[in-house]
């Protein structure tokens, strides 16, 4: 009898803790986004976001940001305050020593006794002077390239209408993955 009462209290406490955790995780929310998905070396990488608590924007709160490279090495670490409107903005560049690949930007802060954290990723490309998606190599990613991609759509290596330049990611097939890369660079020129 005594044991079952103890079990009941343990159950009650764990239930209350679960509810508290669920509530506290929904109170503070920190967003993070970059202005593009793909970047070149020495290109400005603009980061922005906002902090809300109970749905209202919160200003003057210290936010920590960390940029992690493809090898999981912390490359940049800095702090800044949200402005009076609850928003923040920062920018950084990656120099020629940075390795190409997927980088992660992690932000976190403490607000109203809650921890809020979020992250986003971007890709650093190798500087080649060639823009991914510029299939015909004329220096811009436009409808001509889309036409070539369309003409080779679904084709794999060895099929007559396969255009290797249209297989942008080099997977061996011209598909939605290649279209996605082209879309990310749409309108870019060099
Ligand atoms: Ca082109
Ligand atoms: Ca492909």
Image (spheres, helix red, strand yellow):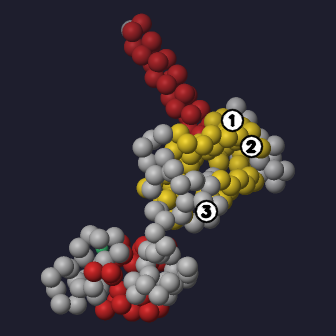
- Determine contact: label 3, label 2, CB under 8 Å: no
Residue 156 sits above or below residue 1 on the image: below
- Determine contact: label 3, label 1, CB under 8 Å: no
Q: Which residue is mark 3?
A: 43
Q: Which residue is mark 2?
A: 80
Q: Which residue is mark 1?
A: 110
Q: Is residue 58 in view from this perspective? A: no
Residue at the (23%, 85%) spot, across then down: 162
Q: Nearer the viewer, residue 127 or 36?
A: 127
Residue 146 sits above or below residue 30 on the image: below
Residue 176 sits above or below residue 153 on the image: above
Residue 95 bears which disc, if any? none
Please tell me how crowded label 1 is: few (under 14), some (14-19), or many (20+) other residues with Cα within 10 Å.
Answer: some
Please tell me how crowded label 2 is: few (under 14), some (14-19), or many (20+) other residues with Cα within 10 Å.
Answer: some
Quadrant including the N terminus:
top left
What is the C-alpha distance between the residues marked 1 and 2?
A: 13 Å
């Amino acid at each position: 009898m005594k044991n079952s009462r103890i079990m009941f209290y343990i159950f009650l406490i764990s239930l209350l803790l679960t509810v508290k955790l669920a509530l506290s995780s929904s109170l503070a929310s920190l967003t993070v986004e970059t202005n593009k998905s793909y970047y070149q070396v020495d290109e400005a990488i603009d980061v922005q976001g906002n902090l809300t608590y109970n749905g209202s924007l919160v200003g003057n709160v210290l936010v920590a940001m960390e940029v992690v490279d493809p090898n999981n090495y912390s490359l940049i670490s800095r702090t800044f305050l949200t402005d009076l409107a609850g928003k923040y903005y920062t920018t950084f560049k990656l120099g020629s020593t940075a390795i190409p690949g997927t980088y992660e930007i992690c932000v976190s802060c403490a607000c109203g006794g809650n921890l809020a954290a979020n992250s986003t990723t971007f890709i650093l490309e190798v500087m080649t002077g060639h823009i991914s998606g510029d299939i015909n190599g004329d220096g811009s990613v436009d409808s001509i390239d889309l036409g070539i991609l369309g003409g080779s759509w679904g084709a794999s290596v060895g099929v007559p209408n396969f255009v290797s330049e249209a297989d942008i990611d080099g997977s061996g097939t011209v598909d939605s993955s290649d279209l996605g890369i082209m879309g990310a660079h749409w309108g870019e020129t060099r």
